[in-house]
Amino acid sequence: MRKLIIALLFTLPSLGMAASSYIPLEKANIDLRDQASLQRGAKLFVNYCMGCHSAQYQRYNRMGRDIGLTDEQVRDNLMFAGDQVGDTMTIAMPAGDATSWFGTPPPDLSVISRSHGVDWIYTYLKSFYVDESRPFGFNNAVFPDVGMPHTMWELEGLKKAVTETVIDADGDETTRIIGFEQVKPGKLNANEFDQAARDLTNFLAYTGEPIRVERERLGIWVLLFLGVMFIFAYLLKKEYWRDIH
Ligand code: HEC
């Protein structure tokens, strides 16, 4: 027990420090049943993410069916020439090149929403800011010193971080990001960009578990079935035991 308390005392301050450099996560408020949003998200994913990231567990035609598109629509709007509609959403960038360009290879994003959670992804997409000290000129408030450039800067425009420096009781200074200031407008206004980030997050939540909507729909029927079965099983049990009790 003593050891545990000592261990906790040591970890608590470091948790506090880690938290101070992150901004609070915003709620993604996604809706997996909103097919228009999923379609917009798929389009953004193909145009702004698939240059570097794959979604290798996802097939184009399966994705199209799930989000309400025909094979033709998928082929005309979401695919690069040369790919077949039954292919998985892989990319041509060799991992070795990617590592030398970005320091870290861009991970496959099929199940990224499962590991980070949707609120993290939504906030991450909205937290890129101009930082000249970084190789691509951008940093991220949710993922400090990230190796990924702000690929949607033309849509969002450019933001600077607004920081605050606090001095704690021990005289230690910490600078943390408390918000952003727009320095150059993008093609979308703030609300439109929020919606784009939400659509993209929605799409990544979908690829993380494509069967989810169906699973929830079936689950209700399974529970109803069990409920009805219970009534019959109970009546049958009463019938069997009537002569014994
Ligand atoms: C120019 C290449 C490039 C493009 C385009 C790109 N990314 Fe990235 N992304 C990266 C790299 C490199 C990393 C790894 C960063 C690191 O670990 O420092 C990364 C990391 C990420 C992560 C964090 C993964 C983790 O393991 O924590 C997410 C989420 C992500 N990208 C989402 C996106 C989305 C969504 C788009 C489309 C809007 C996108 N990326 C476009 C290069 C790219």
Image (tube, rainbow, N blue to C red):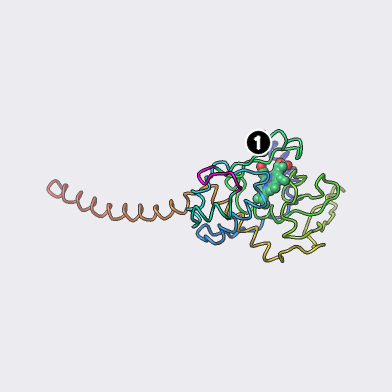
- Name the image quarter holding the N terminus: top right
Asked whether residue 111 is in view, the answer is: no
Q: Report x, y in % for residue 173.
A: 86, 49
213 relative to 145, above or below: below
Q: Amino acid at mark 1?
A: Leu
Q: Report x, y in % for residue 220.
A: 39, 55
Report the residue that reaches farthest toward the front: 82
Quarter assignment of residue 44 = bottom right
Front position in the image: 80 or 25? 80
Q: Residue at x 32, y 52 (%)?
A: 226
Report the residue that reaches farthest toward the right: 171
Q: Residue at x 79, y 58 (%)?
A: 158
Report the residue that reaches farthest toward the left: 243
Query: Within the magenta stretch, is there residue 85?
Result: yes
Residue beneath label 1, please?
Answer: 4
7 relative to 211, above or below: above
Q: Report x, y in % for residue 93.
A: 67, 39
Front position in the image: 238 or 135? 135
In the rendered view, does 190 fall on the left or right side of 1?
A: right
Query: Within the magenta stretch, is there residue 188?
Result: no
Total labels: the figure holds: 1
The region drawn magenta spans 80-87
Front position in the image: 97 or 167? 97
Q: Report x, y in % for residue 12.
A: 71, 43
Q: Residue at x 75, y 56 (%)?
A: 153
Asked whether residue 226 is in view, the answer is: yes
Q: What predominant SS class does the magenta segment belong to? A: loop
In the rendered view, does 91 fall on the left or right side of 36?
A: right
Q: Residue at x 60, y 49 (%)?
A: 117
